[in-house]
Image (tube, coloured by chain):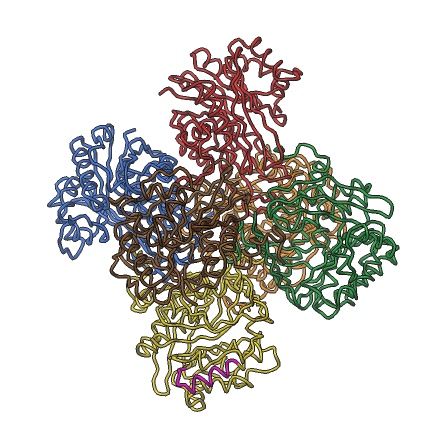
Chain colours: A green, B red, C brown, D blue, E orange, F yellow
Amino acid sequence: MKKIVTLGEVMLRLSPPANQRFIQAKSLDLEFGGSEANVGATLAFWGQDVVHVTAFPEHELGWSASASLRRIGIDTRYIQFSPGRLGVYFLENAAAHRSSQIIYDRADSAFANLNPDVLDWDEILGDAAWLHWSGITPALSANCAEITRKALRKANEKGVRVSGDLNYRSNLWKYGKGPDQIMPELMDLTQVMIAGVRDFNQCLNQSFEDFDSVRDFAFTNFPKLTHLVKTDRESINTSHNRMSAGIYTSTDQYFSKNYDLIPIVDRVGTGDAFAGGLIYGLLHSSEQEAVELGMAACALKHSVPGDLLLSSLEEVQELAQGNSIGKIKR
Amino acid sequence: MKKIVTLGEVMLRLSPPANQRFIQAKSLDLEFGGSEANVGATLAFWGQDVVHVTAFPEHELGWSASASLRRIGIDTRYIQFSPGRLGVYFLENAAAHRSSQIIYDRADSAFANLNPDVLDWDEILGDAAWLHWSGITPALSANCAEITRKALRKANEKGVRVSGDLNYRSNLWKYGKGPDQIMPELMDLTQVMIAGVRDFNQCLNQSFEDFDSVRDFAFTNFPKLTHLVKTDRESINTSHNRMSAGIYTSTDQYFSKNYDLIPIVDRVGTGDAFAGGLIYGLLHSSEQEAVELGMAACALKHSVPGDLLLSSLEEVQELAQGNSIGKIKR
Amino acid sequence: MKKIVTLGEVMLRLSPPANQRFIQAKSLDLEFGGSEANVGATLAFWGQDVVHVTAFPEHELGWSASASLRRIGIDTRYIQFSPGRLGVYFLENAAAHRSSQIIYDRADSAFANLNPDVLDWDEILGDAAWLHWSGITPALSANCAEITRKALRKANEKGVRVSGDLNYRSNLWKYGKGPDQIMPELMDLTQVMIAGVRDFNQCLNQSFEDFDSVRDFAFTNFPKLTHLVKTDRESINTSHNRMSAGIYTSTDQYFSKNYDLIPIVDRVGTGDAFAGGLIYGLLHSSEQEAVELGMAACALKHSVPGDLLLSSLEEVQELAQGNSIGKIKR
Amino acid sequence: MKKIVTLGEVMLRLSPPANQRFIQAKSLDLEFGGSEANVGATLAFWGQDVVHVTAFPEHELGWSASASLRRIGIDTRYIQFSPGRLGVYFLENAAAHRSSQIIYDRADSAFANLNPDVLDWDEILGDAAWLHWSGITPALSANCAEITRKALRKANEKGVRVSGDLNYRSNLWKYGKGPDQIMPELMDLTQVMIAGVRDFNQCLNQSFEDFDSVRDFAFTNFPKLTHLVKTDRESINTSHNRMSAGIYTSTDQYFSKNYDLIPIVDRVGTGDAFAGGLIYGLLHSSEQEAVELGMAACALKHSVPGDLLLSSLEEVQELAQGNSIGKIKR
Amino acid sequence: MKKIVTLGEVMLRLSPPANQRFIQAKSLDLEFGGSEANVGATLAFWGQDVVHVTAFPEHELGWSASASLRRIGIDTRYIQFSPGRLGVYFLENAAAHRSSQIIYDRADSAFANLNPDVLDWDEILGDAAWLHWSGITPALSANCAEITRKALRKANEKGVRVSGDLNYRSNLWKYGKGPDQIMPELMDLTQVMIAGVRDFNQCLNQSFEDFDSVRDFAFTNFPKLTHLVKTDRESINTSHNRMSAGIYTSTDQYFSKNYDLIPIVDRVGTGDAFAGGLIYGLLHSSEQEAVELGMAACALKHSVPGDLLLSSLEEVQELAQGNSIGKIKR
Amino acid sequence: MKKIVTLGEVMLRLSPPANQRFIQAKSLDLEFGGSEANVGATLAFWGQDVVHVTAFPEHELGWSASASLRRIGIDTRYIQFSPGRLGVYFLENAAAHRSSQIIYDRADSAFANLNPDVLDWDEILGDAAWLHWSGITPALSANCAEITRKALRKANEKGVRVSGDLNYRSNLWKYGKGPDQIMPELMDLTQVMIAGVRDFNQCLNQSFEDFDSVRDFAFTNFPKLTHLVKTDRESINTSHNRMSAGIYTSTDQYFSKNYDLIPIVDRVGTGDAFAGGLIYGLLHSSEQEAVELGMAACALKHSVPGDLLLSSLEEVQELAQGNSIGKIKR
């Protein structure tokens, strides 16, 4: 089986239990997560051969972060232990009319500081079928932008398919470059792009007004692009969303079923679960199945606490087929 | 007050806290439960004189299981401490689009191994008004089928009313007999039968297509049958169900109100809460009140974590009457 | 900044975790709360200068109660440490068709026993802009009724605005006086009154049939009254309510948006959050903004466990303006 | 088997987890305990037929208290549900140089308020072999003193053996009588008395200087006395004590082994575990075995969190015989 | 680096939190452990290339068990998912005069049922330097005895060093064979044997009276034996032990320092930590360092909750050298 | 009452529960602490008027840190909300032979970044009797060194007494200055100095061999020095230490009792508890009482989880006098 490579920061996630506010917390639930590793975890849990590339500090919490990936079945051999902090994000998981909040504390992490030269992409991507990146990584530091660039160039050179989740974050991009200076090249090297109108506008410094214009632009300007993918979310409140997704090629479009998500247990990582299902579907099946699998994985993730989906492929396929929702499995 | 006798296995229930998946659990919530003892617990909590008959291994967890029944007010004097394991069931209590899962680990339990000769049903049923059994017991082992047969025969001989919840479980019946070899005799000895179309088809190796046919067949072929009882559940998702129930005699039918159950805290034991309310109603009141009491108990149980209803009779009656739902009681 | 004074008992709140029933609890979550201090906490959290007046026993739990107020920013200098118990309330926080329950154990508390002469209202109300009381206090004991009377008289004398939440509780008023012997004088000394039809009927021994009659009566009979305020709550079940609020002057009325509250995390203290928002609005803005701010605070409180709102002013204003409900804030 | 009757208040015990101080607690561990019921629990756990007499308020926490006794195997049929509070005690369980603290909040409890006339001691003591009381009960209220007096008189009349643990508590005796007005009669009706020099001095308003004087006085002045029993505790610190015990008859004395208790998990209820072992030994064996069994039960209790011993008879006997201490039992 | 292979059952470990008794538990702490995998975990945590061989049932808890090994860095590629249960052990972790207890519930596990033919030892042991087994495995079932025999024969054939911890357990050996029918051949194939006098007597049906006789017999009768290893433990109580260890060759002996272990946090797995340190020392260093490293690992494990050591090599070496015990590392 | 001013960083403390290792943690206990604020907390808890000066980021966790100080009674009016992170320290609280570990993650904190010009020491120290600082602050950043220098100069100018705990930390001092460039001036401005031989050697780049030389040097070279204070700790293991303390003037010396500390619950903050007791004693009593109070506070802190002493003055005085250690207080 050819391997899937994911690249990105993994942070310590600290979150008050139940629906407590930060200011009420006497303890914080601990786990580790990061957008791209979350994608890899979905795929590794489904038996795919996944390698994650990141960096951690050389102390017990860094080891613990690495162990958390290995536990899910991710190959951690290319993880670097190098100078810098362990990035942290504090999550207040809310409900109903209260919005969830994230306090990021990720500056100066081992990953943000990572020297691009220590990663041998020729080796890492040897025998790989797929590389997944997100727009968070080039937003972290010049080093991380360079790491992404090197990875994508090598992947294109070797014929490894590349998916990217643009995932624009306004509170990043603090190192002197704007997204429009970095992202266009990376987008050009990406075959499967997950993005909405806002992502395109921010990354390209454009002002598209609807997704149709984005789609026209994208397939015209990024000749390697094969699939443009978008999820739509309607927020009734923090505990109640409605979602669906679509895959667009230059000629066709494929839509998932609609999901009425209530109650939402944990929204973080739902887009990553989608991306995991999408990649699995595109690797092993059709666009229609890919969008259904992605959206079912996304829907299921809303019911699982933490960053990771942790659902078997069978469980996701069963939901994608709409069978026996809500029955007790014995 | 004449006593109510319940017969069946009680297991150790182990469940990840909150909505965690099994694979996330660092601890498991512990309690004890089993379908027939859950029915007995509802009735004992309402002041009825309830005796439960089962078996446990002679070690601290077996004592603890027995203590958990005694705590609720169940008379434990006929519980046997005998060779075999304590049956265990692992429950992943899910939400929204994720289905709850049960991993049973109950083979070779003290109850499944119990020698039918050690139970003196003449004594146990002395002064009893009611005996409740379920289709789980004869499915466990030849010994358990024989225990059920002896209990039902003696009950009929002594004029003790018998209720049975057919509760067909496909993952049981592993000891060489099929349900159609065992269940017909037991059904014939039962006056109040809780069952749906699928239960009848599996237990009698039939293929009824609707409940009307089941009802005709049942009142024709089981002359001792006085009440056929059925609950209907529509599953929107794991956290949202709709339910109602009906009692059928050979000539009449009685329906409960409809309940819109959201959010569901714990679905396990809701059918047992129904049966408890039903038996109470049939013992002390009319069919109409029995079906309302059963369904109100069932609805309330959806909001209580664990196997047991733990609601007072007054609380259930108040819901059955539809008063002041959702007000804080001070 | 002129200060806001709140007066009332603060109790130890003990509550089974998650949705457990009392009888399932192996531990109880601990915090401190009381209607008027909850109002003060909302205002102190928003940077107002708040002084709370109450009494605690002189032991570690009394100190802890006092510390819990100081933590939120409330000035505790006038809190008395005096003979009597710490009032306790046990709360079973339920869901769906199960009603939440409160067992009060507050008799003979340090506050109920407090000698009215130890409080120097001239000093306490010096430099104050607002005094808030509720109908719970005069219901506790003759001492507490006298304390309230003294506070309100002095406030009116000094030109401090007075708000009162009538909040009639039938399980109080055990000390030999009825509400109609005490409340009329206190209502007459109150400029901003939060009350519904039932409160008026109980406090004045009347039988108004609708709010219009109450409003007519109130503005006719209580000449100092400037604002009559009412919240309306429809209870679908314990986890699902609908709410809105209105402010009435003798000539005008101002209504909030409607809120569909689901799922409800904790309903206790939601009226107090409303009062906090209301007072802030009346002090700093218009009636229309006051009713929206109060109702947004109230809605948000339904999503926060415990007695206190613990939401920033910005967070409440954002909800009052209806922006981006349910988005993750990063 | 003849039954053992125990009489006394059972309180809600609320305790910060681990070694937290009260002021750190975000939750309190909950259980129920009281000196005499703790004695009964030891005996019921060892298969004795134990009846406990007390009173609880008629609400969920009162039912829960009663259920906690029934769980251990105590017969709860004579427990009264009557007006008054549930007594509470808050325990801070400390370590090393920090002393543990108890805040009692037990005034006005259902038991303290209990009408002596509702208890029919002729029936309760019918078929009883033993009655156990403690000096806490007559210290609670005039009613409780009268209840104890009636129980002891009837026991002596019927030939039921009486044991009493004098257990003088200076923070009780608030109802207008001193111990010297009440205790002498009760002591005179007691055959087995657990007491030290201080207890005798306080209860009789004497000033004995050593235990020998106490012993002489006791056997001279209380002609029914058969056994005077004393435990000796040396406190190195909160986590480290040394203990031994002695039984004295008018002619003989029997001493236990010495125990070096470190680390102490929970000291509360250790004297009650002793009394349970003592009574079992005196009922079924010799004085020497009684003092060893009592002291072994006491030592074991120091390692068990909560009020109750919860050790099997075999476990206690094994320790009393000094075998294989500290080995893992498989 | 040549790999180390460990063979043996891994169970679900369920344990009441803190020092609770089983009968007090409302939840059980969950992890996975087994003697030989614990040894492997120590070595994998120290960067050794470790492969563990076992079997699990194909369900979420089986996956979770496997994930727990992978997390520590153990290679799980040879783990079988096959019919049978997941073995469970319930551990009551006690203190002071109370002994810890284990309730085993491991019969009929996937590992006990494993078909010896599915393991290809030629492949598994390819490139291996060491194989570790224990006397628990051949005691589980005839299949497991056969698996052990095949593994040891192949290891000897391939020149892989074999260590075995005899670890006699009287509550196993239920499948019709006694240890003296199985163990002699396995011992004969083992170069490094961890055993005491009792193990030798039980496994060989002998009655040696002291270790010197055992040593003479062992080196005479098992010609492949290079190292006989023994730990000595003195149990003051459950929380306080004293320990040391010795390695014996046919000509020499090497002793560790003595350790005074107080307070003991968790004794389970301490022998496995010893074996891990021992194997590391024998592979990489001298006998003297091996016995010190093993004993330091063993001492440290007494302070770590759970089955696993989870200490770095540096941490263990530092203790072995006796530096700065008890200082805070910053 | 004249106030006491403390200056220093307050961090988020995150610690695995019970004795778990970092790598085992599924949640982390949360509180806030820092050496100088811990000193202030002891004094505020004893009713002293304490002002703490520090800086936090402007987000919920920064507010929570500030609230945690206000809760204890510390005046937080001079706390700055300014750019930078919230410093974090991760603590693994160990036992027996395992050493506790701290992972600091405090670089770039709001306090380290604080502009010295925003603090008006003339105002802050107005009406102050005492200023306490520690060697941690000047080690954090050039800004912090400058803040300390300004505070100490102004204190000396205004006649405010200054105490300093040298507390040399080798893992700080990363901003380009060594302690010998900064500390001599600060020491020269300090009247009460807590320090040992190693602190002096590191801060002054000296190589004193014993404390007598240090003392001679100190009183000769720092003419304002009135008291040199030292604690001595012997580490048997992590759970067992022995301690005593001494105060030295130029002419006299005062020693505390010796304490045998076992078991240790939490060692962090014990030196700060000592300093708090010392300052209280020097402000209100004699040197002899100061050293006893400091050492008793220090001993007690070893039994309290977290950074803070949280013991009343009475409790500490009682231990200092050696009365009734280990008795339950009722």
Q: Point out residue D5 in the picture as x, y percentages from the top left corner.
A: 26, 35
Find residue F58 and report its image quarter: bottom right
Question: Is E131 on the left or on the right of D330, as rendered?
Answer: right
Relative to the observer, which residue lies in front, C125 or F28?
Answer: C125
Which residue is located at x 86 percent, y 53 percent?
Answer: A219
Residue span colored magenta: F147-161
Magenta stretch encompasses residue C322: no
* Image position of A11 with respect to F205: above or below: above
Magenta stretch encompasses residue F149: yes
Secondary structure character of the magenta stretch overall: helix
Relative to the observer, which residue lies in front, E83 or E279?
Answer: E83
Q: Is residue A193 visible?
A: yes
Find residue C155 and report its image quarter: bottom left
Relative to the observer, which residue lies in front, D148 or E324?
Answer: D148
Relative to the observer, which residue lies in front, D195 or A320?
Answer: A320
Q: Point out residue A202 in the picture as x, y percentages from the top left corner.
A: 75, 60
Question: Is B155 on the left or on the right of D268, as rendered?
Answer: right
* Image position of D39 with respect to E41: above or below: above
**Image quadrant in which the N terminus of chain C is located:** bottom left
Question: Is B133 on the left or on the right of A178, as rendered?
Answer: left
Q: Point out residue A245 in the picture as x, y percentages from the top left corner.
A: 74, 45
**Image quadrant in which the C terminus of chain C is located:** bottom right
Q: Is residue E301 visible?
A: no
* Total numbered badges shown on the rendered structure: 0
Find residue A174 and report its image quarter: bottom right
Q: Point out residue C218 in the picture as x, y percentages from the top left corner.
A: 37, 47
